[in-house]
Structure formats: C-alpha cells, structure tokens
C-alpha cells in the first residue's frame, strides 16, 4: 500500500489545524537546513510544517540507526550475500570505509540537529491565542527530536561536535563524547517539570495522517500523529541514563510507565510450549502483542513505495524476498544463538493430582532438540523463522536464487520503532540497578513489578531508595494495585505419552493479571525457576558485596536485552552504556572496555554448551582491537567523522 509522503502529511495537518499554506512553503531545497535564517517562526503554520519536515528527515536515518546499532554488536552476522557497505561495517575497519557507504553519512543526523536548532532558536514561544501558547508544544517536540538525534550520532561516532541551540549555524562546535553530550542536553531541560506538565496538556496533535484510498481500492497506512512524537519522559530518562544520573532516569521511566494517567503494564504474552513434549510454540500472540498498539510507543513512519518518498530497505536486508532473489544479508550470530540456547525453559507443575507440592521442571531436554533455537529461550525462534525451499526456476539461471528462507517478524516496512514498552522496562531495570537496587531491578526480569513483588523486597533495599546521591526515589515503588496485577498461574490437566503409556501432568498457564517478568516472555515460568536468580561469587568463604550484586544483575540484564530486543537497533548502545557504567567500579575511565570487547569478539565463536565458558574462544585480533587500553574511549568502536579521515 502507498503511504502519503511527508509533504502531503503537512498539507493534511494544516487542514486539521484550520490553517492555510502555500505550495512553496512545502519545498525543501537545502541539505542541511530547510529554512531561511533571516526568517522568524512566528506563525503556527510554520511550526506544523517544521515538525513534519523534521520527521521527513528522520526517515532518512531510520534504517541506518537499526543497522549501526546491530552490526557493531554481537547479535548479527553477515551472509555471503551482504552488501559491501554492510561488510565494511561488520569488519570493524571504520577508517577504511568508503565515502560512498550509505550508512556512514553523519551529515544526515546533523541535518536533523541543524533544523531543530534553527526552530528552537527562532520559534516564538510567547505567542498566545485563545489563552493557549500555540508554539510551545511543538517547541518541546523538537527539543526531544534534537536530543534523540544527538544521542544517536554520539553512539555512532564516539566524539562529535556539539552546538548549543542558539549558536552560529556555521560554527563547528566542541567535540564531546556521549556522556558529555548528555550532560549538555540536560541543560536544555533544566525546567523539566514545567515542560512535562505543559506537554501532558498540550502535546501537538495533527490528527490522523495517511489512510488515503488508492486506485485499486486499498488504503495507505494511517498514522496517529501523536505516535510519531518522542515522549518527553522517555528522552529525559535516556539523557539521564547516558549522563549516569541514574536516580532521575529511574524516576522518569517509572513516571512514564505508571503515571497517574498511564499504565504501561508488561502484559502476559509469551512464547510457550503448549504441551509437555511437543515442539510447538505459540508465536502469533507474542509478536502481535509486543509490536501491536499496546506494545509500541513511538516510531518513524516510512513510505510504502519509492514514488511516495523514503522506504525502508530492512526487509531486503533481514528477509528473503523476491527483490533480493531470496538471499538475505544479515542473520543471527552464533553469540545470539548461544545466549538463547543457554537459557532454561521452566514449567511450574504439580507432581500428581493427589500431591499438592509444587515443583519446577525444565523442558525440553536440550540435547534432544534438533533445532538449537528450541533448546532454551523461545523468542528467537518466534521472531526469526527459517525454512528451506527450492525457489529456483528450472532454467539456466536457477543458481541465482537462494533456498534458505529467512523471515524476521520484527520488521514493519512502514514503521521503524524507536521505543516500545519492554525497552522502557529494561532501561528502568538498568537505572534501578545502578542506583544500588539490584533486587528491584532483577524483579522486573523475574516476576514483574507490582505491589505483591515490591512487598517481598528487602526493607534494607527499599530504605536505600530514600537517598540515592541525595535524591529520594521511593516513588519508583508506586505501581498501583488497581493497574498492575501479578499474573497468577492456573492449573490444567494434560497428558503426554511416555514409553507407550499415557502420563498425566499438571501444567501451569497464565491466569488473570497483567504483569509478568520479562524473562518469562520466552523462558516459561521464570518466577518459579530457582536457578534464575542473582548469581554471586561465594567461593572461599567470600562475602558478596552490593557491587557484586549490581554487576551480576547487569550480566543477566544484558542477556535479557539480547533475548528481547535483538535486531531492533539497540544492541551496541546497550553494550556501550553498561560498559560505561562499569568504569566507576574500576576507579574511573570512560568504560570497562572488556565488557563490550569480549562479547563482540565472540559473535562468531560463542559456545553453545552450558558447561563451557561462553567466551572461551574468541576472535583474538578483534578482541585486542576493541579492548584497547581497557578503560579509555576507544575510537575503534566508532565510525569516523569526515574531518578525521
């Protein structure tokens, strides 16, 4: 289906807003800024066009944000048919990348930033009509886009020019790393509470965009304009997380998830074995839930065809399609497979109808499964489907067609997601953990936060929340019972055949409630799994410290991020952030480089055996390159800006 391009979006929005426009106003000629710097934005027409024009520019960087977030991590591998541009990125030889590499174009991120800077410096936020400030909502929207773009470009290039909002457009700006960039961005939100309160009441709303009827009777995808804007609490949470202001990050994430007028519960959809020994998993409800209306928050809208504007190429990169002759370019790495296979899938069951004690059981027998993706966590099998089929034509050109068919169910060709519900919960866990609340963080993974689980946390930990570097964050424990309810298990009688005899079993299924641990998305009843817990080193009588628990939860958290968000573009940022958090544990520096280096270096060699060290075998040359001196900002992690080549 064909999606109206952003120029048409702008016209539709102006009609909704009751404004007028002219065709010349919708013409974008400059590659870096779409406005005349002699102009002042003092009319609502200008602000509507400006915001939609920025969304238009966001389309250009949508694919590369996903690609650059994954291909530098440990979860994807290139196929023999990967493009040269992808292959160069995967090889981690960024200084040798050609200027024509379509993923290495920093100017496109700065095009967004420059337009945001112009808008923020020139919009008349004092203009009031009908007792309403008519531009401040767009001002906050653009402030959020600018912050998001800066965080992205800093993750990609390591040290980047940063220009204040009202700086000279021609100035290059001082180069800063991502922590420094985040600290500067916080200055733009110094009156954050006031901005949040205003945005809650007056977030821009341009109505429904798209949905036009085509000649064949079909309709283009219709977008709610509010779904295209970045929630201010989420971008503030991200900025604080990168700036390592963990207390305020946790508060912003919590307030988004469980605020007075919101209730983003985790939900209870999961990928599950339906019977004790049948290799059948219920995929559809899981993928529909996490990427459906209730699971996703904000996205970049893409066009349905090139005639309309910018389309995504992700389907041709991750999927077997007729356009690529069924040769996909990126797939799961051995490390991604290993993280999935090494998990335990736990059923919570009863021994018999007459024995009331409960017991966990692990199924299936990992060694018995022919498919490695059915040996542990089931999410990878749900989202990355593979099959073999002879699609080649019976002619001399038959060898040009691939026969291994791959489909990534996370791809939506008209929506590139920036935030979804589980990503926010994982970042909340990350922030809480670094606040020194590892039990609370791990509860998000194991059971889900609600009154029942919060009541079971140690009082020592909850007391600690009253003073996190001078900030009281006890509000993070407010998940009201009326909205957040633990999913209970209900029992049903089932049977399997074992040795030719019918054997009754009692298997748990989720009952009423709307909150589970994220680990249960693919690992069964994680809440009842005694082996899924915070691991600590107690060898030789050693007494574990709080720091030990924090670091142990980070190990579980980075694996959960892989299991839940693989192929979505978050991976390198997740590895980078947690590596940076760990620098303080080692007395300072930019990052604990080994945390990232050992994972990326084992992307092709990771062990699938639970009993073997996951990192035993690695690409030593890549490991050495990514390790650097172990603690300084390692430029080998990042692409190179044009002025440094």
Image (cartoon, grey):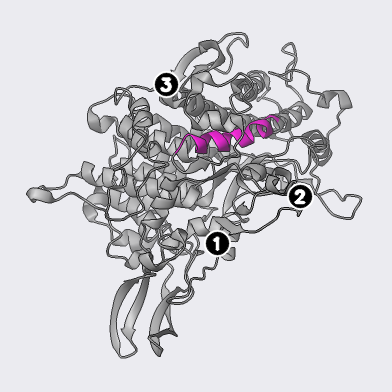
Q: Dividing the picture into quarters, in which one does residue 360 lie?
A: bottom left
Measure how far apart labels 2 and 3 are at the Cα level: 41 Å
Q: Earlier in the sequence, mark 2 or mark 1?
A: 2
Magenta residue span: 57-73
Which residue does the image show at 62% across and 45% down from the upper left? Answer: 328
Which residue does the image show at 53% across and 26% down from the upper left? Answer: 153
Measure how far apart labels 2 and 1 are at the Cα level: 22 Å
- Describe residue 642's horizontal placement relative to residue 178 as left or right: right
Q: Is residue 604 above or below residue 118?
A: below
Q: Earlier in the sequence, mark 3 or mark 1?
A: 1
Mark number for residue 635? 3
Q: Is residue 606 above or below residue 285?
A: above
Badge 2: how crowded within 10 Å, few (<14), some, or many (20+)? many
Measure how far apart labels 3 and 1 are at the Cα level: 39 Å
Any magenta on residue 61? yes
Question: Secondary structure under badge 3?
Answer: helix
Any magenta on residue 74? no
Mark whose residue sits in front, 2 or 1: 1
Q: Dividing the picture into quarters, in which one does residue 391 lie?
A: bottom right
Q: Main structural element of the magenta stretch: helix, strand or loop?
A: helix
- Residue 591 position, x and y percent, is 33, 28
Judging depth in this view, the residue of 389 and 637 nearest the camera is: 389
Judging depth in this view, the residue of 464 and 81 nearest the camera is: 81
Res. 51 visible in picture: yes
Disc 1 marks which residue? 286
Q: Earlier in the sequence, mark 2 or mark 3?
A: 2
- Residue 619 position, x and y percent, is 37, 35
- Residue 93 position, x and y percent, is 48, 24
Badge 1: how crowded within 10 Å, few (<14), some, or many (20+)? many
Mark number for residue 221? 2
């Amino acid at each position: 289906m064909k999606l109206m391009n952003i120029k048409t979006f702008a016209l539709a929005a102006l009609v909704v807003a009751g404004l007028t426009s002219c065709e010349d106003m919708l013409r974008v000629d400059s590659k870096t800024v779409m406005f005349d710097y002699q102009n002042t934005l003092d009319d609502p027409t200008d602000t509507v066009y400006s915001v939609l024009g920025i969304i238009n520019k966001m389309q250009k960087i949508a694919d590369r944000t996903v690609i650059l977030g994954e291909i530098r991590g440990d979860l994807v591998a290139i196929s023999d048919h990967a493009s040269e541009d992808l292959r160069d990125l995967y090889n981690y030889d960024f200084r040798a990348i050609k200027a024509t590499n379509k993923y290495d174009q920093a100017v496109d991120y700065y095009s967004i930033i420059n337009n945001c800077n112009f808008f923020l410096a020139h919009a008349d936020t004092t203009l009031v009509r009908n007792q309403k400030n008519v531009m401040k909502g767009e001002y906050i929207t653009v402030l959020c886009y600018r912050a998001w773009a800066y965080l992205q470009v800093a993750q990609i290039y390591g040290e980047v020019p940063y220009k204040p909002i009202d700086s000279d457009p021609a100035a290059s700006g001082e180069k800063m790393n991502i922590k420094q960039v985040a600290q500067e961005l916080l200055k733009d939100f110094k009156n954050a509470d006031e901005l949040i309160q205003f945005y809650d009441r007056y977030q821009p709303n341009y109505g429904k965009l798209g949905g036009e009827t085509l000649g064949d009777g079909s309709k283009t995808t219709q977008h709610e304009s509010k779904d295209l804007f970045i929630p201010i609490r989420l971008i503030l949470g991200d900025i604080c997380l990168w700036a390592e202001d963990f207390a305020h990050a946790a508060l912003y994430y919590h307030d988004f998830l469980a605020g007075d007028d919101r209730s983003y519960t985790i939900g209870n959809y999961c990928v599950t074995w339906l019977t004790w020994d049948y290799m059948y998993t219920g995929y559809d409800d899981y993928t529909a839930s996490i990427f459906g209306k209730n699971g996703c928050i904000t996205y970049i809208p893409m066009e349905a065809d090139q005639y309309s504007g910018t389309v995504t190429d992700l389907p041709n990169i991750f999927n077997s399609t007729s356009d690529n002759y069924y040769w996909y370019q990126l797939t799961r790495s051995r490390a991604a497979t290993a993280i999935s296979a090494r998990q335990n899938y736990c059923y919570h069951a009863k021994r018999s109808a007459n024995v009331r004690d409960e017991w966990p059981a692990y199924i299936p027998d990992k060694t018995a499964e022919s498919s490695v993706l059915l040996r542990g966590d089931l999410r990878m099998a749900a989202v990355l489907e593979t099959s073999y089929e002879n699609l080649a034509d019976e002619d001399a050109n038959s060898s040009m067609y691939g026969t291994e068919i791959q489909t990534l169910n996370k791809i939506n060709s008209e929506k590139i997601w920036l935030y979804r519900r589980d990503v926010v919960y994982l970042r909340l866990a990350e922030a809480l953990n670094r606040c020194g609340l590892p039990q609370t963080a791990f509860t998000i993974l194991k059971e889900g936060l609600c009154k029942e689980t919060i009541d079971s946390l140690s009082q020592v930990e909850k007391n600690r929340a009253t003073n996190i570097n001078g900030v009281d964050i006890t509000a993070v424990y407010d998940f009201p019972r009326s909205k957040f309810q633990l999913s209970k298990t209900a029992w049903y009688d089932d049977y399997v055949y074992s040795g030719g005899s019918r054997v009754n079993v009692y298997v748990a299924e989720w009952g009423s409630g709307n909150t589970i641990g994220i680990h249960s998305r693919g690992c069964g009843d994680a809440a009842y799994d005694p082996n899924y817990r915070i691991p600590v080193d107690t060898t030789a009588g050693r007494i574990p410290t709080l720091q030990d628990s924090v670091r142990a939860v980070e190990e579980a958290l980075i694996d959960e991020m892989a299991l839940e968000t693989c192929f979505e573009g978050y991976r390198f940022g997740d590895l980078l952030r947690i590596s940076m958090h760990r620098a303080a544990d080692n007395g300072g520096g930019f990052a604990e480089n080994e945390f990232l280096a050992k994972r990326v270096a084992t992307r092709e060699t990771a062990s699938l055996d639970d009993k073997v060290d996951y990192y035993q075998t690695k690409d030593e040359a890549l490991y050495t390159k990514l390790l650097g001196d172990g603690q300084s900002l390692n430029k080998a992690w990042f692409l190179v800006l044009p002025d440094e080549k």
